[in-house]
Amino acid sequence: MSRETKIVTKEEVALQHEYMSRVRAIIEKEGKHLYALVRTFGCQQNEADSERLAGMAEAMGYEITDQESQADLILVNTCAIREHAELKALSITGQFKHLKAAKPELIIGICGCMVSQEHRLNDIKNRYPYVDFLFGTGEIYRFPELLYRAHGSAGRFFIVEETLGTLAEGLPVKRASNFKAWLSIMYGCNNFCTYCVVPYVRGRERSRLREDVLNEARELVSQGYKEITLLGQNVNSYGKDLGYDYDFSDLLADICAIEGDFIVRFMTSHPKDASKKLVDTIAANKKIARQFHLPLQSGSNAVLKAMNRRYTRESYLELIDYMKTKIPDIALTTDIIVGFPGETEEDFADTLDILSRVRYDNIYSFIYSPRRGTPAAQMEDQIPADIQSERFSRLLELQHAISNEINQTLVGTTRRVLVEGISKNDTGMYTGRCESGRLVHFASDVDLTGEIVDILIERAETFNIFGSVARTGKARVESAQI
Ligand code: 5AD
Ligand code: SF4
């Protein structure tokens, strides 16, 4: 049987709505008030999936809780990107054993990327007997049917089907925030970077239809959402599979044309596909945050080749130059993997060199973690852990100095900030994010949570900046000389 991606039909979605009604009827008949908890690991895509799972659980009559002790249904939505993420999900699943012992009617389900791998499915099956059911990333839309089956309880079940991913519309969603929203525009990945597990656990690229994305965006704006983050493993491939001439830049432009005061973000971009047209679209649309996350992974051409990234340091730097010319106040961020197999000291020096040239606002850096089934895990010359962590420290040291220098240049400028709420470290302060993604702390007598506010930056540190409210309402952005 050839494996393909699967577009879920309207009838199949209607069937899931039917299952939602059935579960709701069971719960109502028992006269119980039940709670559901969704624990999420991994990326924004997983958070977005969890919001769908929570939406479906709510439609089935569950109240969403974050208290484990209160929960009657627990879902663990797992990640597989690095070993650490898997170990965390397994460890938390281990802790649920006691909950199940104390409350045998508790239903526990595991889903997401980790369990879409056969060896992890078997781990759960064999070592976690109190887990009731398991489903892969392609079966998220079938959660109502699976939960119905778990309520009927004819034993445990484990479902990861042989598709290369599914695409379903029309499922309910319960968003975690009422001013920031994820908007998935596509799923899956075709790139097969040699270190990465994502293509194996999330299938091939598939784009949502233009109208489905635009309708959801319009709905979010009309509901008062102030920030919309477009999600996809490789947003620059959006539209390639749609069969009509419409790409990611066109989609961005159409979203920006929706009337209202909101900020648009997107992630993640692959440098081989990030086009000048995209840069021009950002430059032309003030609603798009002046931030670009462009994962470099390594600054060495030899390592990039071994990673199957299909760009060079030269082409990457050329694109960065174009961005800086077209959008002088752009804040750049990136992902770096340290200690990829075969990485020499010279290769690593090339990565440091790019950091010094590009001067990213921030980097997300990771020690290479071998993933079962990926080509890099089989490569010779795996780098010893002590060398990896020594390079990792040097990378961070350089980046912290750069971030701090950039932050100092912001002092005295006014930035457009979306207020996220009361500061975690100081309850007398509010915290928000600049368009660049930096955290900004400021005092305010009124609760400005969920509003876009102008903040005058007064003081800066490596990770935080501090300021005061300049004025609320429509913000004007002054560019700092970065
Ligand atoms: N080991 C370490 N980091 C990884 N990433 C992806 N796969 C691995 C791996 N096997 C990093 C990449 C990617 C980010 C989401 O996670 O930098 O951009
Ligand atoms: Fe997200 Fe990748 Fe982790 Fe899946 S494996 S949750 S796609 S980061």
Image (cartoon, grey):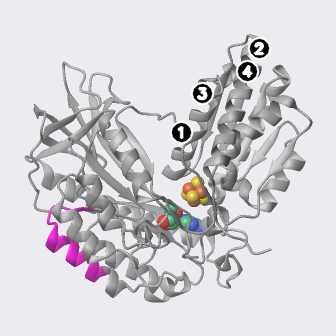
Q: Secondary structure at mark 4?
A: helix
Q: Quadrant of residue 163?
A: bottom right
Read off the residue under disc 3. Answer: 58
Q: Amino acid at mark 2?
A: Lys
Q: Amino acid at mark 3?
A: Glu
Read off the residue under disc 2. Answer: 29
Ligand 1's quadrant is: bottom right
Decide: marks 4, 2 in contact (CB < 8 A)? yes
Decide: marks 4, 1 in contact (CB < 8 A)? no
Q: Secondary structure at mark 1?
A: helix
Q: Callout 1: few (<14), some (14-19), or many (20+) C-alpha neighbours within 10 Å?
A: many
Residues rendered magenta in the picture: 317-331
Q: CA distance from mark 1 to mark 2?
A: 26 Å
Q: CA distance from mark 3 to mark 1?
A: 10 Å
Q: Callout 2: few (<14), some (14-19), or many (20+) C-alpha neighbours within 10 Å?
A: few
Q: Which mark is residue 51?
A: 1
The reply to whether the magenta stretch includes residue 413 is no
* Residue at 51% from the left image edge and 87% from the top image edge: 305
The earlier-in-sequence mark between 1 and 2 is: 2
Q: Quadrant of residue 244?
A: bottom left
The reply to whether the magenta stretch includes residue 323 is yes
The earlier-in-sequence mark between 3 and 1 is: 1
Q: Position of residue 97 (x, y in %)?
A: 81, 32
Read off the residue under disc 4. Answer: 25
* Residue at 59% from the left image edge and 46% from the top image edge: 41
For the residue pair 64 and 42, the one nearer the viewer reads as 64
- Quarter of the image with the N terminus is bottom right
